[in-house]
Image: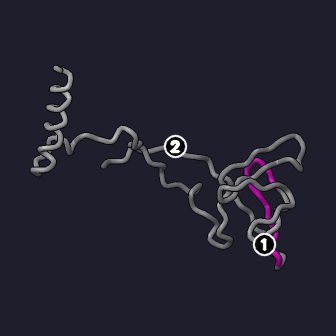
Amino acid sequence: MKILILLISSVLICLLPQLSGTGFCKKLKNPFVSPFTPKASRAYVSNPLSGLNLQAVITTSEQDKNVAIINGKPYYDGSKVKGDTILKITKKKVVLKSPAGKIIKLNLYKFEGFTKSIY
């Protein structure tokens, strides 16, 4: 019985000030939302010419088994990405060839970490 009264009173303490406009519970933060946001870096800027964003590269000792994550999807050597063909996947870049013969290089930038957001 005491637990039920304690639970109801704690709910009322938080709900009544919110309903009345006072700010007792407004300072509480959602524990499921991270206070950190990614730093603005070049890693999140896609190539303006191609609209492709190289997000990760997985390399192996066998060149034909290297994987590039572009726009959230995995691709291998010889795969087609929005009409462009992947020619080569290395540790830091992916080289593509457009149907017109234009060579496009997607560079993988180092992740610079998180910054604490203020909200």
The image quadrant that residue 13 belongs to is top left
- Residue at the (64%, 66%) spot, across then down: 47
Q: Nearer the viewer, residue 5 or 68?
A: 5
Q: Please name the residue that numbered disc 1 is placed on.
A: 83
Instruction: Look at label 2 and name its amino acid.
Output: Gly
- Residue at the (9%, 50%) spot, across then down: 20
The image quadrant that residue 6 belongs to is top left
Relative to residue 78, is residue 62 depicted above or below? Answer: above
Q: Residues within 10 Å of mark 2 (few under 14, many from 20)?
A: few
Say which quadrant the N terminus sits in: top left
Query: Residue 9 placed where, x, y %?
Result: 14, 31
On whether residue 109 falls in the magenta region, the answer is no
- Residue at the (74%, 63%) spot, across then down: 105
- From which residue to which does the magenta span run? 89-99
User: What is the C-alpha distance between the residues marked 1 and 2?
Assistant: 33 Å
First in residue order: circle 1 vs circle 2? 1
List the single residue furthest toward the front. 1
> Circle 2 — which element?
loop
Q: Residues within 10 Å of mark 1 (few under 14, many from 20)?
A: few
The disc placed on residue 113 is 2
Label 1 vs label 2, nearer the camera: 1
Number of numbered markers = 2
